[in-house]
Image (spheres, helix red, strand yellow):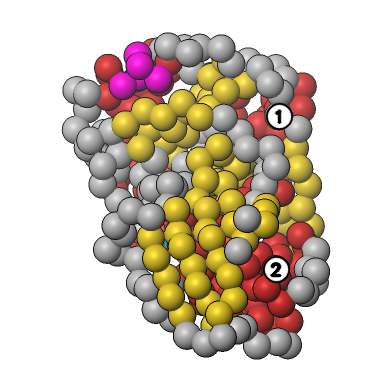
Amino acid sequence: MYRVHIPASSGNMCVGFDSTGLALQIYNSIDFEARKSGLVIEMDTPAPFIPTDGRNLIVRAARRAADRMGKRLPGLYLKQYNRIPHTRGLGSSAACIVGGILLADTLLGAGWSREQVLSLASEMEGHPDNVAPAIYGGVCISAKAEDGYLVRPVPVGEDLAVCVAIPGFTLSTRKAREVLPASVPMKDAVSNIANMGLLIASLYERDYTHLGAALHDRLHEPYRKTLIQGFDDVIQAAYDLGAYGACLSGAGPTILIFLPAGKQDFERQLQEKLRSIPGGWKAVLTDFDRRGAFVETL
Ligand SMILES: Nc1ncnc2c1ncn2[C@@H]1O[C@H](COP(=O)(O)OP(=O)(O)O)[C@@H](O)[C@H]1O
Ligand SMILES: N[C@@H](CCOP(=O)(O)O)C(=O)O
């Protein structure tokens, strides 16, 4: 029996739309082994929204990977430990896709490189910003190349901490992409390019003076925040408590918050403020995952 662990991810880092993302210390795990035939999927806790047949995203990714490897998957037994809240902007679909590909790679002995995993996972997810950090860990910037993706990890200081505010309601990525315009004014594109530069410089230099300003996006957040009850109030609450910056996580509705490391009381203080904001918000102080997905033998 094997077990694959895949971190949650926060796509975009707001201004790096569809290209940049970070991995978090919240994990889905999947136990798996080959069977002679058939497909058995179990959950460690009830998850009525997850299909337990061939429509399951992990299985679809594993089958797609097997096709790409030119091999056939055997029968499968899976047990899912779902810890990443789904449809909240924390990369649950990316985790399933990466997990399914690594499962196929392990059972079929294909020995795929991380670049090969990234290429297929991005194709399935439609963008690389979640799957890259889910595979490599940390903060990753990915750019489409002629043949696959170029991916660069960005070092993150131990002095930077991360918290997420997760609402009780869901927002599918599909729905959150439908509200985006087909084209944007040149000045908005220029603003994002400048802020993306500032963001990466802040991380490299470990100087967070301009981190909040760098997180001002004009390509997607202004359109999506109208779908998110309490958005402005949650962002304000984070700044009031001394956060460096706060923005939409992925396609939302979760909000990603950067803060100085060592503020152990931040989660409790934020939760106190979230109580008066409609939407059933929950504060979770977490950290960057710096390893990425991995498979262990049980
Ligand atoms: N643990 C899981 N097992 C199987 N499928 C899942 C799981 N988590 C999420 N999914 C699939 O991914 C979809 C959510 O994807 P998406 O809307 O992109 O949200 P997210 O921001 O969580 O990635 C779900 O509707 C479901 O199809
Ligand atoms: N770049 C994508 C990110 C989607 O992330 P998710 O965690 O919400 O699925 C987008 O902004 O649509």
Q: Is mark 1 within 8 Å of ligand 2?
A: no
Residue 134 image offset from top left, x and y in percent:
62, 51
Q: Residue at x 70, y 62 (%)?
A: 118
Residue 140 image offset from top left, x and y in percent:
70, 45
Q: Quadrant of the C terminus?
A: bottom right
Evaluate whether residue 264 shows in this view. yes
Quadrant of residue 282 in the image?
top left
Of labels 1 and 2, the one closer to you: 2
Report the span colored magenta. Answer: 267-271
Is label 1 in a helix, a strand or a loop? loop
Label 2 sits on what residue type? Thr
Label 1 sits on what residue type? Val
**CA separation, marks 1 and 2?**
30 Å
Image position of 97 with respect to 218: above or below: below
- The answer to if 268 sits in the magenta stretch is yes
Q: Residue at x 35, y 14 (%)?
A: 269
Q: Main secondary structure of the magenta part?
A: helix
Q: Going by the image, does 182 lie left or right of 170?
A: right
Quadrant of residue 177 in the image?
bottom left
Q: Which residue is mark 1?
A: 156
Q: Which mark is residue 106?
A: 2
Q: Residue at x 77, y 74 (%)?
A: 110
Is label 2 in a helix, a strand or a loop? helix
Q: Residue at x 60, y 64 (%)?
A: 1
Q: Nearer the viewer, residue 53 or 256?
A: 53
